[in-house]
Amino acid sequence: MSSRMIKRFTTSAALAAFALALLASGAARADAAADHYNLAVQHKREGKINEAIGECMKAISLRSDYAAAHRTLGSLYRAQGQFDKAAGEYELCLKLEPKDLEARMN
């Protein structure tokens, strides 16, 4: 094995180890929650309400303190006419972010 191949292998192994460490950390969980939230927002824009709800729920399962995800989930429930569920999500959002204007108005 050439020294160049060894260096590439070592770098790859180091990156893999770093990725595993991130997965085990809270930062990776927060990033994954943000990824799911961003997907939810995109689905909402495309009118895919059920998919957006699923992604919000995944984000919240990773980070229960994700106020924006609770607010968005509330707006999705409201769009479906599920007003009790919407109110519950808005209340959770306001507990986390008392100054959230959108949640306060709904």
Image (cartoon, rainbow, N blue to C red):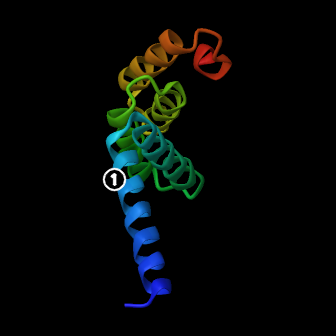
Q: Quadrant of the C terminus?
A: top right
Residue at (54%, 48%) from the top-left corner?
38
- Up-down: is 77 above or below 98? below
Pointer 1: what residue? 20
- The image position of residue 27, as x and y in percent, is 45, 38
Q: Looking at the picture, which amino acid does disc 1 mark?
A: Leu
Residue at (42%, 80%) from the top-left corner?
6
- The image position of residue 55, as x and y in percent, is 40, 47
Residue at (42%, 43%) from the top-left corner?
28
Front one among 3 and 40:
3
Q: Is residue 82 left or right of residue 79?
A: left
Q: Quadrant of the N terminus?
A: bottom left
Q: At numbered mark 1, what does the secondary structure look like: helix, strand or loop? A: helix
- The image position of residue 7, as x and y in percent, is 47, 76
- The image position of residue 16, as x and y in percent, is 37, 62
Front one among 96 and 71:
96
Q: Is residue 59 left or right of residue 94?
A: left
Residue at (44%, 85%) from the top-left corner?
5
